[in-house]
Amino acid sequence: MPHNSGGGFVLGIGLSENAGLADAMALAEDVIARSGFQREQIGCIATLSSRSDHPILRHLASRLNTAVTTFDPIALEAETPRLANPSEALFARMGCHGVAEAAALAAAGKAARLIVAKVKAGRVTMAIAA
């Protein structure tokens, strides 16, 4: 289910059930600023399929005027060779070595690279691929 962001970028997000909205909003602004892109250039938000109904994702997608693309752990695990920060602990819990970086890369496509590696705030992680 690759998403072509049309020259823009993909915001990958990993978050726990009890992640905070304030952390997520501040982190999104931070990683977008680090990327050098503008908010309007977001092609999509990408994450783990089990988080697709998380209120933070719905809020961010609405605020950033973009769609949410999701991937199962098997699809995210396939991105492990391209991750900057693979996590054995995450693999033990979720079945993939990364969510934010892996989802961003999976959605951005095979030729994509990480523009901003995983950044964490509270119980939220984000990364950008293009």
Image (tube, helix red, strand yellow):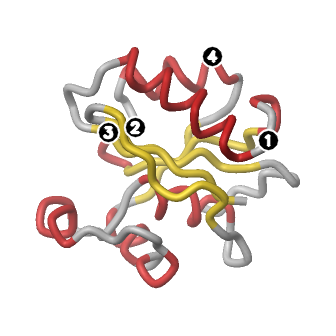
Q: CA distance from mark 2 to mark 4?
A: 16 Å
Whether 129 is drawn above or below 110: the answer is above
Closer to viewer: mark 4 or mark 1: 1
Q: Which residue is mark 2?
A: 52
Disc 4 residue crowd, few under 14, some 14–19, many 20+, Cα 10 Å: few
Disc 1 residue crowd, few under 14, some 14–19, many 20+, Cα 10 Å: some
Q: In the drawing, what numbered circle is on residue 117?
A: none
Q: Which residue is mark 3?
A: 15
Q: Which residue is mark 4?
A: 63
SS label for mark 4? helix
Counting from the top left corner in percent of width and height, residue 39 is at 75, 30
Does label 4 or label 3 sit earlier along the sequence? 3
Q: Which residue is mark 1?
A: 37
**Residue 115 vs residue 81: left or right?**
right
Whether 45 is drawn above or below 117: the answer is above
Question: For this rendering, which residue is in front, 16 or 2?
Answer: 16
Does label 4 or label 1 sit earlier along the sequence? 1
Q: In which image quadrant can residue 125 be found?
A: top left
Asked if residue 51 can be seen in this view, the reply is: yes
Image quadrant in which the C terminus is located: bottom right
Residues at badges 1 and 2 in contact (C-beta under 8 Å)?
no
Does label 2 or label 4 sit earlier along the sequence? 2
Does label 1 or label 2 sit earlier along the sequence? 1
